[in-house]
Each structure stands twice: as C-alpha cells, then as structure tokens.
C-alpha cells in the first residue's frame, strides 16, 4: 500500500506544473473476516478530507481509529478548492500545511463585477503578522492525497479501502458496525463511530436521520478547464455578465493551469443537456473568449442549506457534509467540516480516554450546530441575493448593484458569498471586556510572530495559559507560556491594557481571559473546558 502511494506522493511533490495522476489504493482483506477483532476506540467512516483529518487529529491526541471507505480512489474532479487561513492552520497541526501551501495557488483579492464593469475589490488579509495567507486554491483530490499519505504514516490509523458500512447499531456502552468487503461481511465494535461520509451519508440513512432546512431549485454548472492564461490569482465574480446574460459567474485559478468556472443556469435548466461536453464547451468559450482549453471535469447541481437537528446520536457522531450542507459560494463546506474536526478531536479523545464524561460531547453538538446555523444563514443570504425571483426583488437587487458602482457605502450589501471565517462560540466563561474583542472567549486565538516561529504553532494538543506582559501562573493541567511582546501581540491580546492571562483550549480557541488571573478562576475555567470539576 505504501509503495504504491509513494508513486502518487512523488507526483504531488515534483512541482506545480506536473499533473496529478491518481492511482487506486490497494484493498487488504481485513482481519475481521477471519476472526473477531477486538473492540476499537473509534471507527471513522469516509476517507475524504474530513474523515482523514478526523483520524489524524485523534491520532494527535493518542487515540487509534479504524478509517473505512467504500471506494479506493480520491475524489473525481476538483470539488472543494478554497481552503481558508483557519484550515491552513489546521493543516499545520495535521502535518501537511507546507505541502498544501506550496502546491496551492495563494490569493486574498476578490473582485466583483456587474455586467462588464468592476464594482469593487477586497483584500481578505491586508494585515501582516500571520503565518498563513487568507486562502489558497487547491483541488480536493490533492488535499485528500496528501492527507491519505499522512494518515498511512501514522501507526494509530488503520486505513481500510473498499470497506462499506451496511449497518450501524448503538449498543449502550459501544457502537457496532457491519462492514461489507469484496471478501464478505464482518462486524467491528468501538467506543464511538464518527460519520464523515458526506452529503449522501450512508450512516445517516442507516439511522433514519434527515436534514432540516431549505432546498434551492436554482441550478449551477461547475466546470474545471485546463488552459494557459494570464488571469491573476484572484476570485472574480460577475452579476449578469455579457458573456452569460441575466445570470451569475465565478472564476478561480487552481494549480496545474486548471481554472474553476461556476455558471448559474436557472431553475428550469435540463441537467442532462447542460452537462453534455458540447454544451459546456460552448458556454466556457464565451467566458474565456477562445477555445484553447481542455474540459477536465463538469457537474450540474442544485444545492441546499440544511443540517441535522443534532450531530451527536448516542455513540454515533456526525461531522462535515454528513452533518450539514451549504451552497458552495463562500467556501463554507470543506472549511466548516474541518472546523468540526477541530472542535471534536480533543473532546472525543478525552471522553474515550476517560478524562472527561460523555457529556463533554454535548458541547461539540451545541457549538458546531451553532456554527452550522451561522454558515447556513450566510449561505442562504448569498443564494437569495444571487438568485432573486423576477419582480421587485430582482429590481431591488439590481438597483443595489448600480448604487455600489458609485457609492462605497452600498458595497457591503452586495453579496456574492461571504467567505468562510471561524465561528465565535458563545462560551459562558470569564472575560474582561477591556481586552481586544478579536481575542474574546469563543474565538480562535489570533496568530502573531514569536522569536522561534509563530504563536499559532505554540498552541494546540493541551490547554495553554498565555501570559501577555506577565508570567502566567503555574497550574496542573495546563502549560504556561509567556509571550514575547511585539506590536501584533499587543494589538491583538492587550490593547490599552498592561497585562493579561489567556486560557486557550486544545483546539486553539480562547476559553477565558483575565487582566488579573486568580488561581481559583483559572481552575474553574479549566474544569468547564473539560466538562468536570478540577
């Protein structure tokens, strides 16, 4: 398995111009077909970006897992391509950050057009003092391949391809999964099962669960084309362009001279007709102005903004698209799924290892359903703005676009996809409002340069007590670190104050902060973080 994958790894590492050539992953007969396997700590279902990341993050916390997938190849087509700064920080923690950024196309500028006139542009990361850029574009198959190589290098992860879940049973103190292979069926028992098997989740179906929320009838065409072009590394969005009258269009640059084009088709478009190569090529020619390109992948889709009511169902937990789905505009799908992993990994590890009660998982459910609702709200607003019905709503939308061309005050109301940022959780924890709002409890700790590297790399895995302008107290159960002061640390963590202490969770989220930290208050906040008294 490893030797075959090394061929693919060489393709990935060889350079930005070399095209990706995915081999098949080899199937291995699982031991459960010959004899009963011992109880596992975790089963993860789905070897896409979310499932692979889930197993890696559990391994980072010392928890082994069996990762099963019913396929033996990476995803077909680029699919998710926009990976946010927060996702890149998580990739660093998973051990793939440099490879992803080196291969990806870095961008931070977005341009919005009405017809053929540029209305405005924006820069997502205008400030210095961050390790990672605002976004990179990198095809999902690259991300999966790099993550799979990382997962196969971890002894804690048993990666099994062509192993399909066909039954799931919650059994009180464990969960059992029936798994189908080319050689027959077998059962696995584990403490928990994490379903990361996508929008058509088999696990969700087996448990008789369904999404609630809004379905949209609007149809869109996604096409990946290969061409030589001098388009800059920017996000370009058009309302009613001359090359696609009355609809919307989006253009992104990817590695290997691949470009992503999204075209709104309207609710009455015939999906089978629209995905025919001749029809697609005709549309793409109007976008790029010539025929010197190769059609690599195409899909026609409708989308929905929906989620499960709860993400935790006894011993079965849902993450990523198996738990929630949104429109692709705003890059909230893959990035939101990675934030599920970020939130769940350390909590599930603590429960499995007996360091926290199972009730700690209620905080995963509460925080990530809250985050999903935030993403769904943004995605729904984007969709309604992009696809207003005919009549006064469309007239009002177009009037706003005209106004945005002459007034900067109107531009924030133009919605072509509010891009993904981490959710700020609603934590009932100690806070001093005199400290900067950007690092309030519930937010991801902001990065800043330090003498030996970056602040974000100093956080994670264990609780951290950060001393800013002071030595943090020593307390059992947390690592104490004094930050090196500079303009970025001062601006993001102190503001006008002289000193502060921050308690940061293993997922790099601020749990609590104080100008004056009392030992009893720190102990109380640590206990709240772990869901038990300390």
Image: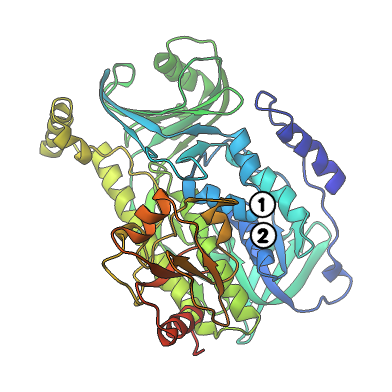
Q: Specify whether residue 71 is in view.
A: yes
* Residue named by callout 1: 95
Residue found 69% across the figure and 71% down from its top: 63
Query: 503 above or below 198?
Result: below
- Which of the 4 image quarters holds residue 264? top left
Q: Specify whether residue 321 is in view.
A: no
Query: 270 above or below 377?
Result: above
Left or right of 396 on screen, residue 64: right
The local crowd at label 1, few if under 14, some if 14 to 19, many if 20 or more residues have their Cα within 10 Å, is some
Q: Nearer the viewer, residue 443 or 391?
A: 443
Q: Which of 298 and 1 is in front in this view?
A: 1
Helix, strand or loop at disc 2?
helix
User: Residue 125 at x, y = what percent?
Assistant: 39, 39
Query: 142 above or below 501?
Result: above
**Which is nearer the N-term, disc 2 or disc 1?**
2
User: Residue 421 at x, y = what percent?
Assistant: 39, 51
* Residue named by callout 2: 56
Label 2 and label 1: CA atoms lie apart by 9 Å
User: Residue 453 at x, y = what percent?
Assistant: 58, 50
User: Residue 237 at x, y = what percent?
Assistant: 34, 29
Q: Which of 36 and 23 is in front in this view?
A: 23
| For the residues bearing labels 2 and 1, Cβ distance under 8 angstroms | yes
Residue found 47% across the figure and 52% down from its top: 447
**Residue that sits furthest to the bottom in the current view:** 533
Residue 488 — which label?
Answer: none
Helix, strand or loop at disc 1?
loop
Name the mark nearer the viewer: 2 or 1.
1
Query: 382 above or below 70?
Result: above
Image label count? 2
Residue found 83% across the figure and 64% down from its top: 30
Left or right of 44 on screen, residue 496: left
């Amino acid at each position: 398995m490893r030797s075959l994958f090394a061929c693919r790894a060489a393709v990935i590492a060889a350079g930005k111009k070399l095209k990706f050539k995915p081999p098949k992953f080899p199937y291995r007969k699982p031991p459960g077909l010959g004899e009963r396997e011992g109880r596992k700590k975790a089963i993860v279902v789905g070897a896409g970006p979310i499932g692979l990341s889930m197993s890696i993050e559990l391994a980072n916390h010392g928890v082994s897992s069996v990762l099963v997938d019913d396929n033996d190849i990476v995803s077909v087509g680029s699919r998710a391509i926009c990976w946010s700064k927060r996702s890149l920080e998580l990739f660093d923690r998973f051990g793939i950050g440099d490879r992803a950024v080196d291969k990806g196309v870095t961008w931070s500028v977005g341009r919005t057009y009405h017809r053929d006139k540029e209305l405005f542009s924006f820069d997502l990361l205008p400030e210095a003092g961050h390790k990672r850029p605002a976004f990179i574009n990198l095809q999902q198959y690259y991300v999966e391949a790099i993550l799979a190589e990382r997962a196969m290098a971890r002894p804690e992860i048993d990666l099994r391809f062509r192993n399909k879940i066909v039954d799931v049973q919650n059994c009180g103190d464990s969960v059992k999964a029936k798994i189908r292979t080319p050689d027959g069926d077998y059962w696995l028992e584990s403490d928990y099962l994490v379903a990361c098997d996508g929008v058509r989740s088999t696990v969700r179906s087996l448990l008789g669960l369904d999404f609630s929320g809004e379905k949209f009838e609007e149809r869109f065409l996604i096409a990946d084309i290969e061409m030589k072009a001098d388009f800059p590394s920017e996000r370009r969005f058009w309302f009613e362009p001359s090359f696609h009258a009355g609809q919307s269009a989006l253009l992104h640059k990817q590695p290997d001279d691949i470009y992503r084009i999204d075209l709104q088709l309207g609710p009455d478009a015939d999906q089978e007709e629209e995905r025919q190569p001749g029809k697609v090529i005709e549309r793409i020619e109007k976008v790029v102005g010539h025929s010197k390109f190769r059609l690599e992948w195409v899909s026609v889709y409708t989308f929905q903004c929906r989620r499960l009511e709860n993400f935790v169902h006894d011993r079965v937990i849902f993450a990523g698209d198996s738990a929630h789905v949104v429109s692709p505009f705003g890059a909230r799908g893959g990035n939101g799924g990675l934030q599920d992993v970020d939130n769940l990994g350390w909590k599930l590890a603590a429960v499995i290892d007996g360091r926290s009660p199972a009730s700690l998982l209620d905080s995963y459910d509460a925080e990530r359903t809250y985050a999903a609702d935030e993403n769904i709200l943004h995605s729904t607003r984007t969709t309604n703005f992009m696809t207003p019905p005919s009549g006064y709503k469309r007239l009002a939308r177009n009037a706003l676009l005209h106004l945005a061309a002459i007034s900067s005050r109107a531009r924030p109301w133009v919605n072509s996809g509010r891009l993904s940022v981490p959710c700020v959780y609603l934590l009932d924890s100690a806070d001093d409002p005199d400290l900067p709002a950007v690092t309030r409890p519930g937010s991801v700790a902001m990065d800043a340069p330090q003498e030996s590297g970056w602040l974000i790399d100093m956080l994670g895995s264990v609780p951290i007590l950060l001393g800013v302008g002071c030595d943090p107290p020593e307390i059992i159960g947390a690592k104490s670190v004094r930050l090196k002061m500079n303009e970025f640390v001062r601006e993001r963590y102190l503001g006008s104050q002289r000193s502060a202490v921050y308690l940061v969770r293993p997922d790099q989220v601020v749990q609590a902060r104080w100008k004056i930290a009392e030992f009893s208050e720190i102990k109380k906040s640590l206990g709240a973080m772990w869901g038990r008294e300390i």
